[in-house]
Amino acid sequence: MALGETPLRFGLDTFGDITVDSDGIAEPAGTVIRAVVAQAVAADSLGIDHFNVGEHHRDDFAISAPDTVLAGIATVTSRIVLGSGVTVLSSDDPVRVYQRFATLDALSGGRAEITAGRGSFTESFPLFGYELGDYGALFEEKLELLVALLREQPVTWRGTVRSSLTDQRVYPRTERGAIPLRVGVGGSPESVVRAARVGAALALAIIGGDPARFAPYAELYQRALREFGQPSLPISIHSPGHIADTDATAVADLWPHYQASFGRIGRERGWGPLTKQHYLTEVASGSLYVGSPQTVAEKIATALRAVGAHRFDLKYANGPMPHRMLMHSIELYATEVIPRVRALLAADVAREPALVGSAHGGHTEASTGTAPSR
């Protein structure tokens, strides 16, 4: 399926990074959470399609219960789809995940979405009494149970990581009969195949390097969907970035906050020092979408083409960035970046018939302009 055959969707992701005030003092979690609600309201009013809130259990992030924050957002927005980014399913209970998101679906009038994943941190495992040695089985079994629950029919399930269920009904049921599910994947082929097997949409977390390197995963996903007899499903990209009026401003704005956040994570994981040159390389040719609206739009369009994706979720909060900076980035994303991306990809689709016709006439070079397939 070509890019032009499925509607493009655009979203925003946040983990609720703890911000600092004008004196460099960390702000309370409550201040950050209320700011996230305000950011979601702005995104809704500006016509952005999705708003996703992550789950972390650390002092550098304010949000440990994303569905609760999303429920608050649901009451002050009207159209934007509200999702997790991600729900750390390995250390949660699928029954409670279903119940919380079914409740969110009711509050929002059918706007809930679940993105299930393993998460990029491990703090939740000891916090909730799980062993890291069970990492694989926890996610595999709980995902299967969550998929069964989302059918909203009596569930019979057997596994090793929680008690079994026999012809069990779980409430509340949603008015629309289903909650959309994505599986967040960071680059494991096994995870890609798993998402296809359970019939979940694929959310690729691309946080470094050339996004084109994920094209084989997209191809694997589409092939696995066919082999499992699943319908064609969309692919989305999640990547960090920041938009300002000019390239220079955006690069300068983000660097100290990016350095603070990713520098800390790198030290915790034993990585080498985060350098300014590494940052600039990611901005120039990697998966940091930083710059003016035109620069970021062109880079997003290139990534969507390369992967064959139909949705892009910008992680707009990266480190202790001030609220005003985030709000301006959101505004530029909605009013300038998204229209530019749509125009760039629409131009690809408009060129495709002529290019195909040229190919039929014997001009083989026309194939280089064909829109990517999913």
Image (tube, helix red, strand yellow):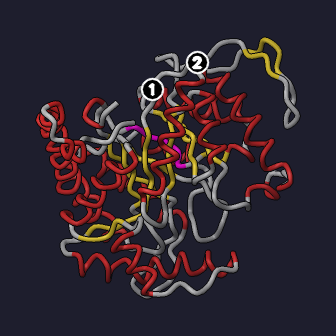
Q: CA distance from mark 1 to mark 2?
A: 26 Å
Q: Position of residue 51 (x, y in %)?
A: 40, 47
Question: Residue 249 falls in which quadrant of the image?
Answer: bottom left
Q: Is residue 186 above or below residue 226?
A: below
Does 227 sit left or right of 212 as displayed?
A: right
Looking at the image, which residue is at 49% across and 26% down? 106
Q: Amino acid at mark 1?
A: Ser
Q: Amino acid at mark 2?
A: Arg
Q: Mark number for residue 62?
A: none
Mark 2 highlights which residue? 173
User: Can residue 71 be seen from the camera position used here?
Assistant: no
Looking at the image, which residue is at 71% across and 29% down? 144
Mark 1 highlights which residue? 232
Q: Position of residue 317 (x, y in %)?
A: 42, 65
User: Can residue 259 be seen from the camera position used here?
Assistant: yes
First of labels 1, 2 by sequence position:
2
Q: In the image, which residues are magenta?
A: 81-85
Quadrant containing the C terminus is top left
Predominant secondary structure, magenta span = strand
Asked if residue 84 lies in the magenta stretch, the reply is: yes
Instruction: Bin the neighbour count of mark 1 within 10 Å (Cα to Cα): few under 14, some 14-19, many 20 and up.
Output: some
Does 350 sit left or right of 159 as displayed?
A: left
